[in-house]
Amino acid sequence: MKLLLIEDEKALAVSIVTYFQRENFICEWAPDYETAVEKISIYRYDCVLVDIMLPDGSGLDVIRALKRKYPDTGIITISAKNSLDDKIVGLNLGADDYLTKPFHLSELNARVQAVIRRRSFQGNQNIVFGEIKIDPAQHLVQVSGHEVVLTRKEYDLLIYLISNKNRVLTKESIAEHLWGDDADLMDNFDFIYTHIKNLRKKLMDKGCPDYLKSMYGVGYKFSEK
Amino acid sequence: MKLLIRIFRYHIFASIIALVLGASLFYVSVRFLIDREVNQELFSSQAKVSWQLRNIDRLPVYILQLGDSLQLNAVRFPRKPSLTDNTLFDKTTREFQPYRQLTFYEQVEGQWYRVTISKQLIQRRQLLSAVVMTVTFIAALLLILLLLLNNWLSERVWRPFYKTLGSLDAYKLETHEILQFPKEPTIEFDQLNKSVSQLTARLATTYQNLKEFTENAAHEIQTPLAVIMSKIEGLLQDETLREPQIMSLLEVSEAANRLSKLNNVLLLLTKIENHQFLAGNEEINLVTIINRKLRDLEDLIETRRINMQTSLVPTGPVMNAALAEILVNNLLTNAIRHNVDQGTIKISLEPGKLVVSNTGNPIEVAPEQMFERFRKVSTNSSSIGLGLALVKTICQVNEMDLAYTVDSNWHVLTVSWK
């Protein structure tokens, strides 16, 4: 999978690139509009992450250029502006998703994977992790062929955990993924624990090994080891 | 007090002084003329009486009718003739009347007589009343004219002033409008209009600059925050980290998260206060928003075993849809956040009124103070303390009323609109 990150803040770009390289993505970085346009005219990417505010131009123009050349490429806009206008303009131009700074890298990762899944296989690709098979089109979860009935939040949580497999996920990032702006309503993170506990139980009831590891104090990790 | 009335007062004051002075002068001069006339009459009578007495011993009847009365008294010695004013009793009118008396002495056949001719000064009283009446009439006429003139002035001459005042009243900073006026023939009003135009132009620029600065500052903070958070996330993946280090990292991460949220809410507050959200032009059905929000918060409500009671009539205020969403969101999350486990939330929506009540712990401060920014009851709550401030601000810009009452353990927030 090939990614292009268009972001002028070097420190942030380095974090993102490192993060995706660990996920075995080929991740390239363009610090400005000029480089970005040059890169998208030469290479083909599976997903492009665009910061809307660039020092020498607008990320929206990059999206327009990209849409003309490779309309199938997934696009996620990143903006420091939490403004509805930018969001709508970006989505109207054909962007698939929108993230506002600051964000959790795990959240970005989950979004990138979702976009690639939708773009590359028309959303029909099943997500497989060990015994677990998820059909995103039908919101169907199976463990070794047996269906597991999950609530909406448990389903979202499972997708999020698998998208960020083998990584430590903070409770904060999980809470924000599941509840967005309402995440701060949880005075403590016991609440996530309830969902995690229920999810783990439902999976293990169908014979799934315990993939969910609690990292003391930090959060959770979904891994085979 | 209206400026014209103030000026009118001075006008009246000045007119009265002028009238009193003028009337006194008039009275004095006319009296002087009358007095001279009376004196001349008296002296001519004296000449006639003297001549009669010297040449003809008897006084004819017509002489006795000179003046208003004539008296002859025999005296031993003559004295100097004198002219005096006296008050005498008039038998016909039965009252005292002013008289001018000319007294002189005449010798008839060796005998001295004192002759006193009296002339009633009736004209003087008449004059006084005539002068007073005339002055009163002039004063009344003048006042009426001044009043009419003032009315006319305020309607015609002052019209540009009231127009400028009206446009200043209706002036809205957030529209970035620069007030422009047609050229006025009155120099003062033209100057006023020019100053107002310049002022609004400066205001618009300053406001624009300030707004850009606030927005830019808020946005620029988000990128460094993104860097901090991404670096922490990267570090957390390092398995060689020990627990104290992880704990520190988590605290930094939490602080950065909080800062970001704070920044977002403050930015939102500023935007609302600056009226950067377009005013809505249709009624928002709050029921849809409330139900959607309740669905989002469903599991939270269930986990805390909060009992939900709703009585919703499809209605709502005319306002911006995004703001209505934020309003409902903050009211509901506030009711959940400050609720007790197994508590109750009642939502009642009726025409012109949305009431959200929740059970909760009693608060020690006055309920109205909860609308202040960063006002929190507990310090360990993860809330940033801007929720109700946001609700208040939204209500203010949309001219809705927000009331917070606490009745034993019930907290009731009422939003009402027209």
Image (cartoon, rainbow, N blue to C red):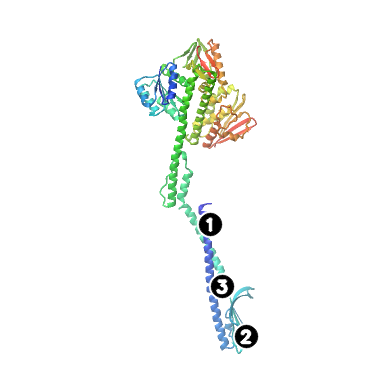
Q: Are marks 1 and 3 on the same chain?
A: yes
Residue carrying label 1: B9
Mark 2 Cα within 10 Å, few/some/many (few <14, many 20+)? few
Q: Is residue A21 above or below residue B168?
A: above
Q: Earlier in the sequence, mark 2 or mark 3?
A: 2
Is disc 2 placed on a helix, strand or loop?
Answer: loop
Q: Is residue A76 above or below residue B165?
A: above
Q: CA distance from mark 2 to mark 3?
A: 35 Å
Q: Position of residue B92 (x, y in %)?
A: 63, 75
Closer to us: A122 or B384: B384
Residue carrying label 2: B77
Q: CA distance from mark 1 to mark 3?
A: 36 Å
Q: Position of residue B94 (x, y in %)?
A: 64, 73
Q: CA distance from mark 1 to mark 2?
A: 64 Å
Residue carrying label 3: B123
Q: Are marks 1 and 3 in contact (CB under 8 Å)?
A: no
Q: Position of residue A83 (x, y in %)?
A: 46, 30
- Mark whose residue sits in front, 2 or 3: 2
Q: Are marks 1 and 2 on the same chain?
A: yes
Quadrant (top left/top right/bottom left/bottom right) for the C terminus of chain B: top right
Is disc 3 placed on a helix, strand or loop?
Answer: helix
